[in-house]
Amino acid sequence: MGEHREHQYKAVVIDLFDTLVNWNPDGLPLVEFRGREIRSTTPLLFPALETALGERFDREAFMDAHASVYNEIFTERSGGDALEVTCLERFVRTLKRLGMEEKEVGPLAENLRKTHMARVREVTKAPAARIEAMKTIAKHLRIGLISNFDDSETGHLIMADTGIRDLFDAVIISADTGYRKPNPLIFKQILGMMRLEASDILFVGDTPQSRTAGRHSGARYRALGLGGASRATRSAGIICANILQPTFRDEAATGRGRYRRRRRSARSMQTRIRSRPRDRT
């Protein structure tokens, strides 16, 4: 674990999902897939697919193709370069796998993207305590945000929905850049946008990817697990205390801690994705 040390930061850079906002999968429709009921936006996509494909549309074939493409993209994202693959590209690949002609793919894929992301946005909210916390933090530190999210338009709309977008000096959605955390390029980009050195920034997040991004950039990282319904009601004061206290137990970017114990292999993560498809991105 890191040691107690005093450090004067100029800015805090946070994550979006499970740090500033929560998304609620219970707001997605239920659909049966491979003998199980799951929450997914796919039932919302069926009308557009039926209209475009007519008798060629097969629900099971679409869902199988989409799950296969999703797993392939997960593997690509887990590679050493941590490249981003957009939601639009995911639907393009899925439709091509179904044998659609090139001229049909583009417009339909865009339609599916918009429908899918509209529901993702609808079920994503920022708890009031976090909004108040960020307002307080902004009085003391500059604020930036980096999010691994595969749709630029929706990521920025979700930020606008919080009502505090103007508090942030810089916002990066991974779909804007072509790479994701922990690729150090995404962190170097926000340093350039904010015109700061890595040592000036405290990076706050809740994932191993966030931790690794901070380590690669030379910045310090502070875990701030705010996910879950019970944690969503934490007071603004508690959240601010975790970030603003002048002396705290932070973790040096190269140190060890809970992250090492919680880290999972890419194989186990991929197995979990296959067994329980997620549909936020």
Image (tube, rainbow, N blue to C red):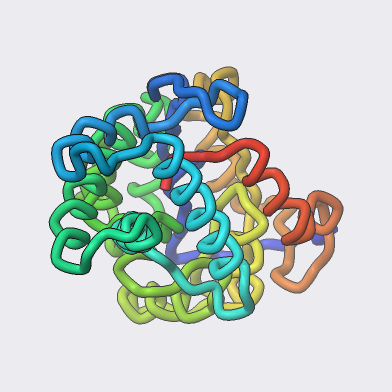
Picture layout, residue 116 above or below residue 87? above
Q: Is residue 19 left or right of residue 161?
A: right
Q: How many marks?
A: 0
Q: Where, by quadrant of the figure, is residue 79 drawn?
A: bottom right
Picture layout, residue 232 above or below residue 218? above
Residue 148 visible (yes or no)? yes
- Give the camera-side residue of 28 and 100: 100
- Give the camera-side residue of 89 and 173: 89
Picture layout, residue 270 above or below residue 185? above
- Quadrant for the N terminus, please: bottom right
Residue 117, given in percent of the width and then of the height, sits at: 28, 42
Residue, far front? 55
Residue name at image x 82 percent, y 58 percent: 260
Residue 276, given in percent of the width and then of the height, sits at: 62, 36
Picture layout, residue 1 above or below residue 103? above
Q: Where, by quadrant of the figure, is residue 10 drawn?
A: bottom left
- Give the camera-side residue of 110 and 177: 110
Residue name at image x 56 percent, y 80 percent: 81
Residue 143 visible (yes or no)? no
Residue 239, given in percent of the width and then of the height, sits at: 53, 35
Residue name at image x 43 percent, y 31 percent: 40
Residue name at image x 28 percent, y 33 percent: 46
